Structures are given as C-alpha cells and as structure tokens.
Amino acid sequence: MTKQNVVVPEINTGKQVATAQKPPVPPSGYTAISRKKLLHNVEVNSGGRINSWVDSMRASSPTHINSTPSLSDDQTSWMVQHPSALDMFEQIIKASKGKQIVMFLDYDGTLSPIVEDPDRAFMSDAMRATVRKLARYFPTAIVSGRCRDKVYSFVRLAELYYAGSHGMDIKGPSKGSKYKKGDEAVLFQPASEFLPMIDEVHKALLEKTKSTPGAIVENNKFCVSVHFRCVDEKKWTELAQQVKSVLKEYPKLRLSQGRKVLEIRPTIKWDKGKALEFLLESLGYSNCTDVFPVYIGDDRTDEDAFKVLRERGQGFGILVSKVPKETNASYSLQEPSEVMVFLRRLVEWKKMTLRRQFRMRRQIEDVFSYLT
C-alpha cells in the first residue's frame, strides 16, 4: 500500500444522497460506429511485442485530417453520437438547472494547442482571461498529466485547483476558496513513495533516448513523459525498445499512451477520474444531487474522467477532437478556440442569471416595503 499525504477540508453533510441521473444525451435513432477497439494501456510485463507498442503509438496519435467541404459518413455519425457542445448549449444549461456547475479542464490540447515543444505549450492571454472569469462563477480545476508546478507556470491563476501528474498531485487555491470551508488548501499525493523511482527512470530514459532525434523526456514529478511528436515515425520502434529496456527493471511502473506521448506512471489505482472524485468530495459534493460536473479534455487519459461522470449519472464530458474517437464523453468541441467560446458562453449565461435573480429580489423587496 502506498503512503498518502492527505489533507481534506471538512465535507458538507446535510446534502441528499445522489440518485441515478442520466447525463444529457444526443438525439437517438442512430447506431454507434463499429470500430476496432484500440489498445488503451500497454503493460511493460505483459509479454507483448514491440510491434504492439508501435501500433498503439500510431493509434493514440491520429494524423491530422484535411479540411473537406463535407464530413465522411463515419464523422457524420460520430457527430450525431457526440454533438457539438456549442450547438447543444441550451440543452446543457437546462440539464444543469438548480445545480452547482463544477468545471474540470485538461490543459494541453484543451486550453492550449498541441505544439512540437511541450515546454512552449503556452495558453493565450484571451484564454487565461476566460478561465479567470470562469473561476469567479464556478469551482474550476485544471487536471493535467503535466507536473503541477509546470501547468501552474503556464496558467498562472492562483484561484484554481490544480491536479498534476494525472491527478497524483492535487492542490487547492493558494488563498483558499469561497467554495469550501476553511482556508486549508487541498493537498493529495497518493504516490509519494514513488518519487525516487520516478527520478531514476527519468535519468535512465534521458540517457537511453538521447540517440533518437526529436525524443523529449519530461519529468512530471509523479510520472515521466516521453514525447515522440518530433520523432520520425521510422524511429518509433527504436524508441519503444529503448523505453521498454528501461521499464523492465521497474515492475511497479506501467506505461500508457496519449497524443504522441508515452506516459510512465506508478501502478496504483489512481487517474484523472479518481482526481475528479477526490476534488468533488473536497468541495462537499461527493454524495449529493445538486452538483453538475463538466470535464473537458482531448486525450485518452481524460477518458477515465468521462467514464466516472457517466457512471455517476451526473454532469457530462466534452471531448476536444477534430476526428472521430471512441469516447465516454457526451459532447464534442473541435479545438481550444471552441473551448474558449463554450467557456465564455457559460460565463455570460451565469452573469445574466445572477442579474435576473438580483432584479427579482429588488422587486420583491420593493413590494414588501410598499405593503409595510
């Protein structure tokens, strides 16, 4: 059992236990796309061939599609299954009526574009301003595979919750939050004992992969990322062999894949879905009906969070993708620019709602004052 460093704020207790509630669904009458199930995790000690690793690397890193006037049949069918969150905005708002919306956002590919150099994945000033406004009205968390300190250096908003290393390093707002009791920051690190091992693997991979042009090894504190976005595809097999040669000495670590990145993580049962549940509990929404979590992400690792929301029957997931993918998300957006539009619409809707409530209170107060 791994050691845990946990500080959990007081949990609200007067709320009703959640009952089964299905998230909003797209129009019915269509069948799901029949597609070959892709490999989601590649275990180092499974005896699988290097070719399987490379096939999974290709599957997790789809090539960009050319812009065409019309969608293919598969794309059209997929969009029916996972309609645009912008097109379905009114239905989404209707489903959230009377509930507290809580926002969970991936970083790379969601708030910032995917770039060749992971150290230059900067978010725009416009996106930062949008997320800042979002956090004024809704509890907001960034859930990333990046090191928490690294993603914070990109976002630079102290009022947010940050879950780095796929949720293995969680911290709340540095100045406390109006959404939870007390001033104590949420802190959760379920894989602390793996830190020395992660450092060893990082150093070994730096040495082992230096002969592969374009390979970038990133230490994300509780996990190590091997980026192959700039690696010639002909060199992927060589890179996979290099990674496997290092990981075979570390049976307590496992390998999973994202968009042109190999992720080396501890084998504990913890992921972005677990991080989402932990943060909801920390905010006092673990077992209640008046919460509406929204998770927006673009990568395979975000599927754990999408799945949790479906199983809870609360809120929904939004996949950021231009191409059809197997997903547990309910809706889709094509790129970070659409994410920004969606977040801005949420903010404007909330502002209008608060204005209406304020006017109604004033009218009631005026009537009461007149009668008395």
Image (cartoon, rainbow, N blue to C red):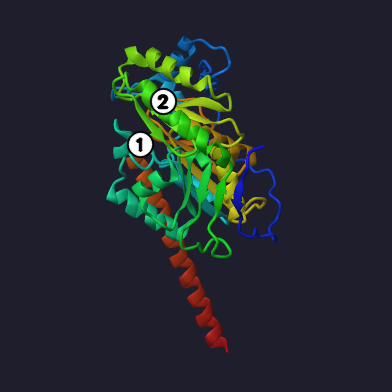
Q: Secondary structure at mark 1?
A: loop
Drawn side of residue 114 relative to residue 355, left or right: left
The residue furthest bottom is 372
Q: Secondary structure at mark 2?
A: helix
Q: Position of residue 173 (x, y in %)?
A: 47, 57
Instruction: Report the residue at 54% width, 64% height from top.
Output: 183
Three-letter amino acid code at the position of disc 2: Leu
Q: Are marks 1 and 2 in contact (CB under 8 Å)?
A: no
Instruction: Report the residue at 42% width, 61% height from top.
Output: 351
Q: Position of residue 2 (x, y in %)?
A: 63, 38
Q: Quadrant of the N terminus?
A: top right
Instruction: Report the residue at 50% width, 55% height from top.
Output: 172
Front in this rendered view, residue 110 or 77: 110
Q: Earlier in the sequence, mark 1 or mark 2?
A: 2
Looking at the rendered image, the disc whose residue lies closer to the viewer, 1 or 2, is 2
Residue 333, image quadrant = top left
In this picture, is 124 found above or below 198? below
Q: Which residue is mark 2?
A: 205
- Which numbered disc covers residue 335? 1
Front in this rendered view, residue 208 or 298: 208
Instruction: Report the residue at 50% width, 71% height from top.
Output: 360
